[in-house]
Amino acid sequence: MFRNALRVSVILGILVCALPGPARAAGACARTVIVTMPGVIWSDIDREKPPNILEAAGHGATGSISVRTDSSVTSYGDGFLTLGAGTRTEASDVRAATERVEHLGSGPISFAYETQVAQFDELTRSAASSSYEPQLGALATALAARDDIAVFAIGNADLGMVEEGGEQGRWPLFVAMNENGVVERSVVDQSLLAPDAAAPFGVRTDPERIRRAVGEALDDPCSMIVIDGGDLIRREEAIVRSVPSAALREPLLALDALVGAVRSRLDPARDLLLLVSPTSPLTDALPHLGVAIAEGPGFGAGDALTSGSTGASGIVALTDVA
């Protein structure tokens, strides 16, 4: 687990034990927000200098994260699935998808309840054959032991319009799903997207709509929220598939603006923000360590993240997050 002066699990344990009965009280609750940064490494942060991510790093503890899972190359599915399982696992070629296909939307943000992850049975069979014996959905299942804690998945990395042949990429579902492959609350449909002929696959994440979705989730004082901006994945997938892409700066700064909106709503004395790279850049054959930042209780400015799994100061692993 991530740790600094205190282990994350100890922090969360204290918060859960402090919760009252069925009625939620903001003073006794906390929010944990996990913002994923697929394919982002520290040299990208140094070069592009995203201001809100750098500010979070300056106020919290930082480290590099090993994205090694059960495969030689960590795919999006492997990385996100491992975040939610807390144990190395792999998704093979299973994409994070829901059973329904939704259209672009301009109306009010609408959270889906009890969303079933498609192909969950296939994921379960793959996990059963792993030597690491992963328990899929362990993180959300543990939180569900206290029905005071709401679990949210927000973000869409679909490769274009699905009804026109695009592929679903709703990766936060893999982190937020429980042991049955069900996500309590989610906004992962194409209502988060805006058409953009210049963007990879012709769509981009609408910054205002994803900000509204995150804002509504943050209204819940007892929650874990998993966020993926989507555009980083679309950019990387475009490069891998040799289709028109974009420079890293644009999607990284879009995500950075979302991080700023999240930080403006969190109480660093109570709430926990985790910025995590779930994958190494898929455009590079060599594996790289990703970015890990923890801002919140027990994580002091300038401190290094450590964990029992790596035994090295400043180096943590995907399995430590859960």
Image (cartoon, rainbow, N blue to C red):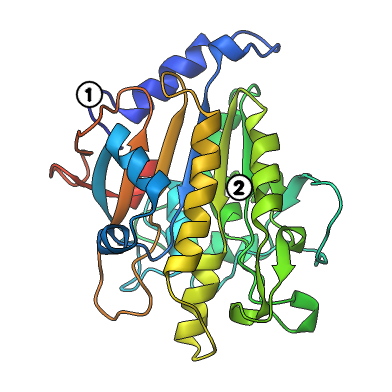
Mark sitting on residue 177: 2
Tell me the crowding category of disc 1: few under 14, some 14 to 19, or many 20 or more residues within 10 angstroms, Cα based.
Answer: few
At a point 23% along the width and 29% down the height, the residue shown is 4
> Is residue 110 something one can see in this rendering?
yes
Residue 149: where, in percent of width, then height?
Answer: 61, 26
At a point 80% along the width and 67% down the height, the residue shown is 101
Numbered label tally: 2
Q: Is residue 300 left or right of residue 178?
A: left
Residue 68: where, in percent of width, then height?
Answer: 30, 62
For the residues labelled 2 and 1, the Cα–Cα distance comes to 29 Å
At a point 25% along the width and 71% down the height, the residue shown is 287
Q: Is residue 40 left or right of residue 185?
A: left
Q: Name the image quarter holding the C terminus.
A: top left
At a point 64% along the width and 11% down the height, the residue shown is 25
Helix, strand or loop for disc 1: loop
Q: Nearer the viewer, residue 299 or 84?
A: 299
> Is residue 60 something one can see in this rendering?
no
Q: Is residue 267 left or right of residue 185?
A: left
Residue on which the image places disc 1: 5
Q: Name the image quarter holding the N terminus.
A: top left
Tell me the crowding category of disc 2: few under 14, some 14 to 19, or many 20 or more residues within 10 angstroms, Cα based.
Answer: many
Question: Is disc 2 in contact with disc 1, using a CB cutoff of under 8 Å?
Answer: no
Residue 10: where, in percent of width, then height?
Answer: 35, 22
Residue 42: where, in percent of width, then height?
Answer: 27, 58
Looking at the image, is mark 2 or mark 1 earlier in the sequence? 1
Helix, strand or loop for disc 2: loop
In this rendering, the answer to whether 57 lies above or below 284 is above
Amino acid type indicated by mark 2? Met
Residue 100 occupies which quadrant of the picture? bottom right
Residue at the farthest bottom position: 242
Amino acid type indicated by mark 1? Ala
